[in-house]
Amino acid sequence: MWVKEINIVGVGGIESLVLKLDKNMNIVCGPNGIGKTTILESIAHIFLHGQTNILKRNAKSDSSEINAIVDVDGEEKRTKIQFSEFVPSKAAQFSGLYNLSEKLLSLKINRTFIYQPLNSVNKDTEKPRGSTWGEASQGLNLNDVKNWFVNRYLYSPHNTLTEEQLANYELAKSSFSALNDNFTFSRVDASTNEILINTPSGEIYYEYLSSGFKSTLSIIFGIIKEIEFRFVDPRMKAEEFDGVILIDEIELHLHPEWQSIIASALQKLFPNAQFICTTHSPHIIQAAEPNQIIAIESHDGRSAQRNLPSTEHGFKGWTIEEVLTDVMGMEALRTPAYKEKILSFEKAIDSEDYIEAKSSLEILESMIHPNNPMKKMLRFQLASIKGVEID
């Protein structure tokens, strides 16, 4: 199952927006307040059956409407949702493709990593159909991923796990190396139920991993355990999951080096899933494949999809600055202090005021990166007016 197209009218900050989606990976970018999260929530809510106060009518619209085309094993399913609620306390009634909600996984930004001692290991959570409807709007619970992993570790040697559960456990173990091959799963301590990881610095507790590492593991473990809990009869290997996975701010807590590989790592682990993610990271966009980027911009206060150049290799050869300006629509890459001083320098050059230009250059050189070739260019400009007589 995958979402082919969504048409959002009068929802949140979006007046009208039509998006055609990629079957594998979709990365939505744009400025704050442009409607990135609204896009994810609109997709999630087409699988909801019940009330929610998450989505609200656009202030300039009389009513809201979400139309979607979902491909289910080659057959197109269409759905339309309408509502008009605007007051925060009033909930809207939704009834979309709720019979397909098992194949919709929504991960929101509330991915927290507080220490969780496991005094005992609990059994699997039962997932009746009604709970997956609600999770379309509420998002997945990631607080139980540690319990799930320890449970599988304890039962894996005793021939009590099914073939699918064993495959999922092995997939989870391999995910410790998803971002860095130097990190691997070590063991679970029998006396404390604590997960231990092999690292270049030695064996450490799971909780001692960086926030970025734990953010990634919580996403991966959350997807695997949720697939296990939802698909019991028949069971499913997580790597075979062919549904939709929504991730808000996929780069959350990640260093830029890991931001550039997180999308491809997730696709490698779950090759049959459709990912729809939001991001503020140019590194994620830079590493993406062609046709995977959905850039949203504002036209006269209205959200619209930005026209991007279609190239064979996407933006892999672009600089971060080029991605920021030509994809993400960022206008200013320098600080106001720098722009003010470079303007003073240029005015001094134009008026052949050597003293003012030299003063501005001294400040600029202390601002610019030590190896920036722009320094040499500015010095040449200053030298060009050095012989001018100064009053």
Image (cartoon, rainbow, N blue to C red):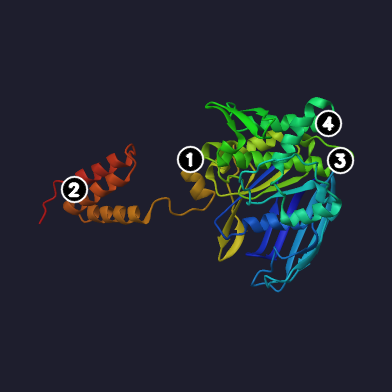
Kind of residue at disc 1:
Thr
Q: Earlier in the sequence, mark 3 or mark 2?
A: 3
Residue closer to the observer: 88 or 73: 88
Q: CA distance from mark 4 to mark 2?
A: 80 Å
Any mark on residue 307, and which?
none
Q: CA distance from mark 1 to mark 4?
A: 48 Å
- Helix, strand or loop at disc 2? loop
Residue drawn at 76 percent across, 49 percent down: 3
Q: Earlier in the sequence, mark 1 or mark 4?
A: 4
Q: Nearer the viewer, mark 3 or mark 2?
A: 3
Residue closer to the observer: 100 or 163: 163
Query: Can residue 183 be spotted in the picture?
Result: no
Image quadrant where residue 78 sits:
bottom right
Kind of residue at disc 4:
Leu
Q: Which residue is mark 3?
A: 232
Q: Quadrant of the C terminus?
A: bottom left
- Helix, strand or loop at disc 1? loop
Q: Which residue is mark 4?
A: 161
Q: Earlier in the sequence, mark 4 or mark 3?
A: 4
Residue 184 placement (x, y as % from top left)? 63, 27
Q: Nearer the viewer, mark 4 or mark 3?
A: 4
Residue 194 placement (x, y as % from top left)? 65, 35
Kind of residue at disc 2:
Ile
Residue 64 placement (x, y as % from top left)? 72, 68
Any mark on residue 385, and which?
2
Q: Earlier in the sequence, mark 1 or mark 3?
A: 3
Q: Are marks 3 and 2 in contact (CB under 8 Å)?
A: no
Residue 169 placement (x, y as % from top left)? 75, 32
Q: Earlier in the sequence, mark 4 or mark 2?
A: 4
Q: CA distance from mark 1 to mark 3?
A: 46 Å
Residue drawn at 81 percent across, 53 percent down: 131
Any mark on residue 319, and which?
1
